[in-house]
Amino acid sequence: MTLLKKAKEVASKYLKFVYLGNVPGDSDTECPGCGRLAVKRRGYHVSLLDVTPDGKCPACGFNLGIVLF
């Protein structure tokens, strides 16, 4: 396990939204409630995948804190 992945693992115990920036394949945001992919990142391109209009995960209802406008 790389040092960055170990740091992510430790941080995930204390924080809800942890991802490694500029690391291919490990920059996405998953729902802390169910693990569903919510935000996909590739370089500077960010895609919001599936979030309810009030910013919650459609699978489990966890508030992702995403504000849609």
Image (cartoon, rainbow, N blue to C red):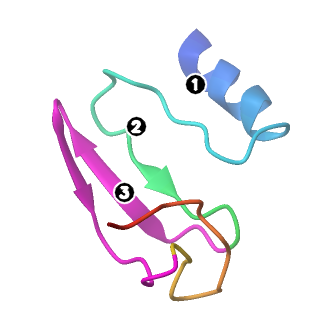
User: What separation in Å lies between label 2 and label 1 (alpha carbons)?
Assistant: 9 Å
Q: Circle 3 sits in a helix, a strand or a loop, which is it?
A: strand
Q: Name the residue that disc number 3 marks.
A: 39
Whichever of labels 3 and 2 marks the residue nearer the N terminus, that label is 2
Q: Hey, which quadrant is residue 9 in on the image? A: top right
Instruction: Give x and y (percent) for residue 55.
Output: 51, 73
User: What separation in Å lies between label 3 and label 2 (alpha carbons)?
Assistant: 11 Å
Instruction: Give x and y (percent) for residue 68.
Output: 37, 67
On residue 5, which mark appears? 1
- Which residue sits at x=54%, y=78%? 57
Residue 2 in view: no
Q: Mark 2 is on which residue type? A: Asp
Q: Name the residue that disc number 2 marks.
A: 26
Q: Mark 1 is on which residue type? A: Lys
Whichever of labels 2 and 1 marks the residue nearer the N terminus, that label is 1
Q: Are marks 2 and 1 in contact (CB under 8 Å)?
A: yes
Query: On screen, 8 above or below 52?
Result: above
